[in-house]
Image (cartoon, coloured by chain):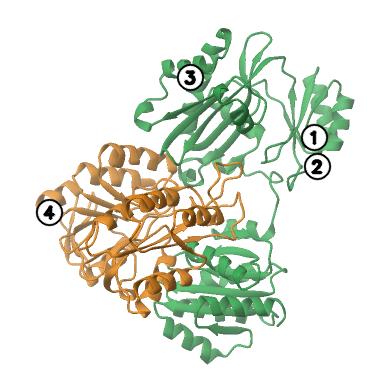
């Protein structure tokens, strides 16, 4: 098994420009069922080079083609509307890759789609997710990993690739890798993914890669301590050297000055270790800890 | 983006949030003296920096005459408030204050909504009030669906009542809060803080201070954001300035190892690994996803334009970024930069890493060293920086 996406995943792509087409094609080459591209003015055409049809609306693609997942690649100003369209069309899993979405837009989207709608939204500002050997929705390079039993969840893209790569070199594969994104308001939190991993019989161990800012890592840590104390879990928090008050690339990666506390990497590491979770000080160490747990 | 007080007040004014009569923005003691003369009566001389604690640092003073205003200006200009040098002063007509309260609306990351905070105890550090007298602070979480058409007035009034504002201030304060919440949405602000919110002796409720943070991600729908970029309001740094203009994610740090890589998380991890190798990074620079050779070269030039930088770590894990293009950018930048002293340690992995590494090997540039892993790359970069 895997979580959120598998061989039955049928994807529509909202945003069929250069980026959307490039990544959708890579996903298709990986074996993902891309069933349609969406463009309000280009319905009925064939989407080159994927060879699938363009539909004018997500609803059409859900009704005619059984699409259940959407990958959102439209520019930031249109992301809110695109996600709401997918939600209203009955899509079950929405994966928003787009970076730079205004935080008020996402706050409203979260309220409608996740809090009240109960629909799975991943991102925005995320690399998407991959269940190796089954489906790849987003921009994660499929060739650096393989099917296996480690569940990986991360706020960072390339850092995740780094860890998957090191695990793969040690012969360790992944059940699902979920990039939840680096924005302050995202649809799916660490805790949501870790709970899903806990229910997945094929996921035996969990690695999570956090960052400075916010407190979602701690929430996940508490749940792990109270519910799955025997599952091997390894963490890494990026940004031990990040100064307070500075945004480190990701919109959400900031230790607020005069903020609530618990937002720095050192504080998060201490809190998580207090909950009995091993936290590495760099990505290679995280991979090594996982390798040790599994050997 | 954070605004200084006078900008925050201009933004309040535009959105109908009551503020004191406008003052003058000054850059010299002469201008301050003239402003005080023009405004007449009592004036307040206020340092304009993007940093709290101005009052304590001596950055806010009352002046009874234009001469006194000038004296204060001379002591306030150049003042260092937690690393922020004062270049701009706002001269404002004095307000007759009867009482001081606290009011803010913040975007609430944890609750994924908004938070209204109100207290009858204003004019001091709200965190301090919260510690010593938590009952005096009302914290009201608000979901977007509860305020889809704005903050309902009865709810605003309820907040003011629970914060125990005196009856003659409640109604006005409630109206002000409704306006503040609307302004927050209209301007894409993540923070709007008024400390103090005042009741004047003649019975008006006004925002005597304004602390506003705007969401940079929303700049596409706010032409006005560009107006707030005013010279002298925050420490000017040549690299940070150049990065901003080039659209590169760059943060200056205190060390001497230049660091660049692809992806915010990987670059943050690179800073950590450099520290673990006994060094300290001079900067954070994320070249982004799918960077071209030109972006790579431009980023490298930017890092090397900082004369504190003694060595550079280039850490790339190619996903959509191609390592051969990174190598091309590195070598191109080295050609343009000519004879430099700093060594570059380049670590390439992922998409087209073999091609990239081969290009570096073939070029055999005397400044460029390849490393197989992140840890090795950091160790070597730190060793070069310390002259080993």
Quadrant of residue B380 within the rendered picture: bottom right
Assign the C terminus of chain A to one quadrant of the image. bottom left
| Marks 2 and 4 close (CB-CB < 8 Å) | no
Which SS class for mark 1? Answer: loop
Say which chain tag 1 marks. Answer: B
Say which chain tag 3 marks. Answer: B
How many residues crowd mark 2 within 10 Å: few (<14), some (14–19), many (20+)?
Answer: some
Instruction: Determine whether B342 is above or below A200 in the image.
Output: below
| Marks 1 and 3 close (CB-CB < 8 Å) | no
Whole-angstrom CA distance, mark 4 to mark 1, is 66 Å
Whole-angstrom CA distance, mark 1 to mark 3, is 33 Å
Which SS class for mark 4? Answer: loop
| Marks 1/3 same chain | yes
Q: Position of residue B30 (x, y in %)?
A: 85, 34
How many residues crowd mark 1 within 10 Å: few (<14), some (14–19), many (20+)?
Answer: some
> Label 4 belongs to which residue?
A66
Instruction: Determine whether A256 is above or below B90 in the image.
Output: below
Chain A colour in the picture = orange
Whole-angstrom CA distance, mark 2 to mark 4, is 65 Å
> Label 3 belongs to which residue?
B159
| Marks 3/4 same chain | no
| Marks 2 and 1 close (CB-CB < 8 Å) | yes
Say which chain tag 4 marks. Answer: A
> Label 1 belongs to which residue?
B58
From this viewpoint, which residue is outermost toward the left? A64
Quadrant of residue A80 within the rendered picture: top left
> Label 2 belongs to which residue?
B79
């Amino acid at each position: 098994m895997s979580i959120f996406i598998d061989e039955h995943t049928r994807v529509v792509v909202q945003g069929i420009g250069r980026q959307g087409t490039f990544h959708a094609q890579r996903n298709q080459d990986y074996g993902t069922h891309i069933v349609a591209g969406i463009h309000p003015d280009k319905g009925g055409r064939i989407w080159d080079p994927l060879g699938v049809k363009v539909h004018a609306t997500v609803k059409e693609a859900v009704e005619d083609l059984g699409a259940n997942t959407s990958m959102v690649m439209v520019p930031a100003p249109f992301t809110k509307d695109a996600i709401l369209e997918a939600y209203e069309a009955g899509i079950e899993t929405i994966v928003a890759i787009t970076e730079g979405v205004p935080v008020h837009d996402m706050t409203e989207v979260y309220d409608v789609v996740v809090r009240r709608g109960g629909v799975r939204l991943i991102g925005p500002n995320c690399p998407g997710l991959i269940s190796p050997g089954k489906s790849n929705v987003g921009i994660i390079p499929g060739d650096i990993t393989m099917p296996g039993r480690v569940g990986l969840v991360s706020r960072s893209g390339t850092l995740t690739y780094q860890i998957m790569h090191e695990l793969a070199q040690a012969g360790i594969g992944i059940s699902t890798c979920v990039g939840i994104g680096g924005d302050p308001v995202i649809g799916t939190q660490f805790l949501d993914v870790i709970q899903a991993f806990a229910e997945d019989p094929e996921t035996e161990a969990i690695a999570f890669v956090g960052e400075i800012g916010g407190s979602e890592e701690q929430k996940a840590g508490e749940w792990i301590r109270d519910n799955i104390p025997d599952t091997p879990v390894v963490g890494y928090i990026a940004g031990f050297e990040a100064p307070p008050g500075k945004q480190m690339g990701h919109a959400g990666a900031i230790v607020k000055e005069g903020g609530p506390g618990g937002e720095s990497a050192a504080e998060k590491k201490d809190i998580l270790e207090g909950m009995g979770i091993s936290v590495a000080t760099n990505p290679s160490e995280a991979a090594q800890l996982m390798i040790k747990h599994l050997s | 983006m954070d605004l200084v007080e006078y900008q925050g007040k201009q933004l309040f004014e535009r959105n109908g949030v009551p503020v004191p009569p406008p003052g003058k923005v000054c850059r010299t003691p002469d201008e301050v003296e003239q402003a005080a003369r023009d405004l007449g009566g009592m004036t307040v001389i206020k340092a304009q920096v993007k940093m709290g604690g101005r009052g304590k640092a001596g950055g806010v003073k009352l002046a009874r005459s234009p001469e006194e205003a000038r004296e204060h200006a001379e002591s306030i200009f150049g003042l260092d408030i937690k690393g922020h040098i004062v270049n701009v002063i706002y001269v404002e007509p004095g307000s007759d204050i009867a009482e001081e309260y606290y009011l803010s609306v913040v975007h609430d990351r944890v609750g994924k909504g908004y938070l209204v905070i109100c207290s009858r105890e204003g004019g001091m550090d709200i965190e301090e009030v919260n510690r010593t007298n938590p009952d005096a602070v009302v914290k009201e979480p608000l979901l977007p669906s509860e305020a889809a058409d704005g903050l309902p007035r009865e709810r605003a009034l309820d907040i003011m009542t629970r914060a125990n504002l005196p009856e003659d201030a409640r109604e006005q304060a409630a109206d002000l809060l409704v306006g503040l919440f609307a302004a927050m949405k209209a301007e894409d602000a993540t923070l709007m803080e008024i400390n103090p919110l005042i009741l004047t002796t003649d019975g008006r409720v006004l925002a005597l201070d304004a602390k506003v943070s705007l969401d940079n991600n929303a700049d596409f729908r706010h032409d006005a954001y560009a107006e707030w970029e005013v010279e002298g309001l925050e420490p000017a740094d040549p690299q940070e300035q150049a990065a901003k203009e080039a659209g590169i994610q760059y943060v200056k740090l205190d060390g001497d190892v230049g660091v660049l890589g692809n992806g915010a998380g990987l670059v943050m991890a690179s800073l950590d690994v450099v520290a673990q190798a006994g060094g300290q990074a001079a900067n954070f620079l994320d070249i982004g996803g799918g960077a071209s050779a030109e972006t790579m070269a431009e980023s490298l030039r930017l890092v090397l334009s900082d004369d504190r930088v003694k060595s550079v770590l280039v850490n790339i894990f190619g996903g959509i970024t191609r390592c051969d293009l990174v190598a091309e950018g590195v070598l191109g930048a080295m050609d343009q930069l000519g004879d430099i002293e700093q060594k570059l340690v380049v670590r390439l992995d992922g998409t087209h890493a073999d091609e990239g590494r081969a290009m570096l090997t073939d070029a055999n540039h005397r400044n460029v060293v390849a490393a197989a892993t992140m840890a090795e790359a950091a160790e070597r970069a730190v060793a070069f920086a310390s002259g080993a």
